[in-house]
Image (tube, rainbow, N blue to C red):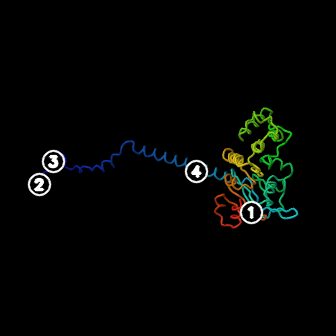
Amino acid sequence: MTDTPADDKGAPPPATYGEERRRVPEPESEPRLRRAEDELRARFAEELQEGEETQDRVAASREAIVELDHVSLAFDRPILENVSLVARRGETIVIAGESGTGKSTTLKLILRLLRPDSGRVIVDGEVLNDVTYEEALIIRQKMGMVFQGAALFDSMSVFENVAFPLREHTTLSDDEIEARVKEKLEFVDLDPDRVMDQLPAELSGGMKKRVGIARGMAVNPAIMLYDEPTSGLDPLTTGTITRLIMKLQRELKVTSVVVSHDIRSAFRMATKIALLAERRIVFFGSPEEMTASQDRYVQDFLGGV
C-alpha cells in the first residue's frame, strides 16, 4: 500500500480540465458575449425596419392610380356595361379590342370629358363623377394625353407645341420653359436644335408622334394616356414609339393607359391587357395570361392579329 505524501493530506483531488474552465472563466468572455448579443439585436432591429420599409414601398407601388369601378355608359345605344379595370402606380395598361368597342370612350371617361351613367371613375384617389369643370381641369394636369395622329397645332413650331401646356398650366419663366422643352425633346430622342423651329408639316409621322409624347410629358404628369400611338406607322417607327412608352414606365415610373389595335406592340409594353368586346371587358391580365387563356373569343382575337 502506497503512503499518501504529507503535503497532500486533506487536499481535494485535482480538478479536471473542464472543471477548471468552469471555475475560472476568461476575464473578458462575458462582456464579449454581451456585446455580440447587443450587436445581433441591433442588426435584427435594423433588418426588421428595412423589411417594413420595403413592404411600405411595395404597398405604395400597388396603389391604384386609375380605376373604373363597374362603369356603364350609353348614348343612343349602350357603349360600356359594368366595366371595371385598375391601373396601379407604374403599370402600363393596354386597352385592346375591335373597332367600336368603346376603347377611346374609356380614355374620355378617365379625362372627365364624359361622365358615366353608373359606376365610378377614380383618378389618383379622386372620384371624377361629380367634380366641377374647374376641379376637372386641375385633375387633368396630372395627366398627359397623346392623341391619335399626334394632333399638333399646325401653325405652331415644335417648340411652341411642347411649350403650350407649360404656358397654360405653370408659372415657369421663359428660360425654364425652354429648358423643359429641350429636356422632353431629348427624352423622345429628338435633337432640340434641329426640330424646335420646324412646323409639324415638316416632320415625318414618327417624329410627330414623338413630339406629341414630348408635349404630353411637358408638365411631368404621373399618368399618360395614349390613343392609338402607333397607328399608321411603319414597323421600325412603331418599335421606336413602343420603346418610348416602356422608357417612361422604366425611368419615370409613369402610369400609362394605352388604347391600341396593335397587339404585338401591346404585348411588348403592357403590364396588363384589357380586352373589350360586346361592351364589356372579357379579359384582363398579363400578356402571358392572355396567351395561355382558353377563352374562345380571346384565342380568336389573338389568331386574327
Q: Are marks 2 and 1 in contact (CB under 8 Å)?
A: no
Question: Residue 81: image x %, image y %?
Answer: 79, 64
Q: Position of residue 106 (x, y in %)?
A: 79, 57
Screen quadrant of the C terminus? bottom right
Closer to the eye: label 2 or 1 = 1
Spatial CA span between label 3 and label 2 = 13 Å
Q: Residues within 10 Å of mark 3 (few under 14, many from 20)?
A: few
Q: Which residue is mark 3?
A: 5
- Amino acid tagged 2: Met
Residue 1 got which mark?
2
Q: Please provide percent x and percent y for residue 147.
A: 80, 49
C-alpha distance separating marks 4 and 3: 69 Å
The amino acid marked with disc number 4 is Gly
Callout 3: helix, strand or loop?
Answer: loop
Question: Where's residue 280, x and y in %?
Answer: 76, 64
The mark nearer the N terminus, 1 or 3, is 3
Residue carrying label 4: 51
**Picture quadrant of residue 69:** bottom right
The residue located at (13%, 51%) in the rendering is 3
Pick whichever of labels 4 and 3 is earlier in the sequence.
3
Q: CA distance from mark 1 to mark 3?
A: 103 Å
> Which quadrant of the figure has residue 191?
top right
Give the distance between the C-alpha atoms of the residues marked 1 and 4, in whole angstroms.
37 Å
Which sits earlier in the primary sequence, circle 4 or circle 2? 2
Which badge, 2 or 1, is on the more N-terminal residue?
2
Mark 4 neighbour density, 10 Å: few (under 14) some (14–19) many (20 or more): few
Q: Nearer the viewer, residue 107 or 137?
A: 107
Check residue 281 in the rendering and tell me which mark sits there, or answer none.
1
The amino acid on which the numbered mark 3 sits, given as a three-letter code, is Pro
Q: Nearer the viewer, mark 4 or mark 2?
A: 4
Image quarter hosting the N terminus: bottom left
